[in-house]
């Protein structure tokens, strides 16, 4: 995963754009988000997924089938890359023996087993990154980092790293995923935006999940948005399939099982409802 990934240029996009990521095999949340897109009259060509359609929850195949049928723009997250290659782990770069590593030994084999060959073939068609023009800006959609799809980049991550990625990719705006938390970081007219994820709460003590709307009506604008869904149904399905109970609990209480991947600043904000 060390090389610069395949980048697909999709030209110019205009109008409202819905950005989301981290479905994590949570079909109930994905269905709720699609209903939001329909209410907002946002067409599929203006919907972008930052990857990790597959993850901790119980319906990986159903989520992949829905994203395919929705016909939106999506990149492959590290989980999709691993699954389409039939690799044995999720590719998140967790340290051996950590809580995240141990839990991934449960949910990832389940996901790999329950993704059909048809969907593995479809995953081969997903680019690892997208680029496009919007409101006069050059935008890059990536999952984690530019040269490492599983790199964790947070709000507290030094701007110099983000700036280096923008310089190398020649992007004015980066739409990122992977870290699980929504945030924005803006300097010198350049934007690093993370829509957050819809498959798990944002470690803020609520069951809400997050996405983002871009708007070009008056130049460039963005807004973080959250929504609720039938998380109890998602948790029930996880229990029926013997998936990690700690992740099922997070769906309701909004607290991550652990903060191993988080920097100190983000760890200190655990349980505090986000106000973006």
Image (tube, rainbow, N blue to C red):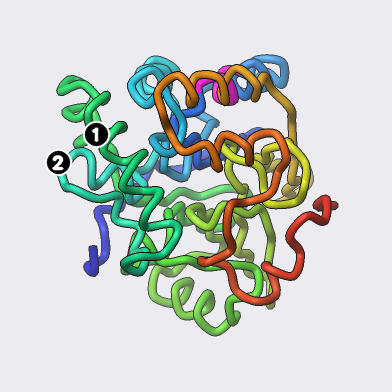
Query: Residue 266 falls in which quadrant of the image?
Result: bottom right
Is 144 rendered above or below residue 232? below
Q: Give the residues drawn in magenta, as a range.
A: 27-31
For label 2, the residue is: 86
* Mark 2 vs 1, N-terminal side: 2
Q: Residue at x 48, y 26 (%)?
A: 238
Q: Is residue 192 left or right of residue 98?
A: right
The kind of secondary structure element at disc 2 is loop
Query: Residue 15 falls in which quadrant of the image?
Result: top right
Q: Residue at x 24, y 69 (%)?
A: 2
Q: Nearer the viewer, residue 91 or 40?
A: 91
Q: Nearer the viewer, residue 66 or 270?
A: 270
Q: Nearer the viewer, residue 178 or 238?
A: 238
Q: Position of residue 258 (x, y in %)?
A: 57, 59
Q: Nearer the viewer, residue 150 or 8?
A: 150
Helix, strand or loop for the magenta stretch, by majority? helix
Is 265 rendered above or below residue 106? below
Whether label 2 touches label 1, CB < 8 Å: yes
For label 1, the residue is: 112
The kind of secondary structure element at disc 1 is helix
């Amino acid at each position: 995963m060390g090389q610069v990934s395949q980048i697909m240029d999709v030209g110019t996009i205009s109008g409202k754009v819905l950005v989301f990521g981290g479905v994590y095999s949570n079909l109930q949340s994905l269905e709720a988000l699609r209903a939001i897109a329909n209410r907002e009259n946002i067409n599929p060509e203006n919907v972008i997924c930052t990857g990790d359609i597959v993850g901790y929850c119980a319906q990986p195949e159903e989520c992949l089938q829905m994203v395919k049928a929705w016909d939106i723009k999506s990149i492959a997250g590290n989980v999709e890359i691993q699954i389409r290659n039939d690799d044995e782990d999720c590719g998140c770069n967790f340290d051996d023996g950590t809580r995240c590593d141990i839990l991934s030994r449960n949910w990832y084999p389940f996901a790999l087993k329950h993704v059909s060959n048809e969907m593995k073939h479809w995953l081969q068609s997903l680019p690892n990154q997208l680029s496009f023009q919007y409101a006069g800006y050059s935008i890059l959609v990536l999952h984690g980092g530019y040269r490492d799809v599983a790199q964790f980049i947070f709000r507290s991550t030094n701007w110099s790293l983000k700036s280096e990625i923008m310089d190398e990719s020649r992007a004015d705006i980066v739409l990122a995923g992977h870290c699980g938390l929504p945030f924005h970081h803006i300097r010198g007219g350049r934007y690093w935006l993370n829509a957050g994820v819809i498959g798990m709460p944002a470690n803020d003590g609520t069951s809400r999940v997050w996405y983002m709307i871009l708007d070009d009506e008056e130049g460039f604008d963005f807004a973080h948005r959250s929504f609720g869904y039938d998380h109890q149904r998602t948790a029930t399905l996880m229990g029926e399939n013997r998936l990690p109970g700690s992740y099922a609990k997070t769906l309701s209480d909004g607290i991550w099982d652990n903060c191993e991947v988080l920097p100190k600043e983000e760890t200190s904000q655990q349980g505090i409802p986000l106000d973006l």
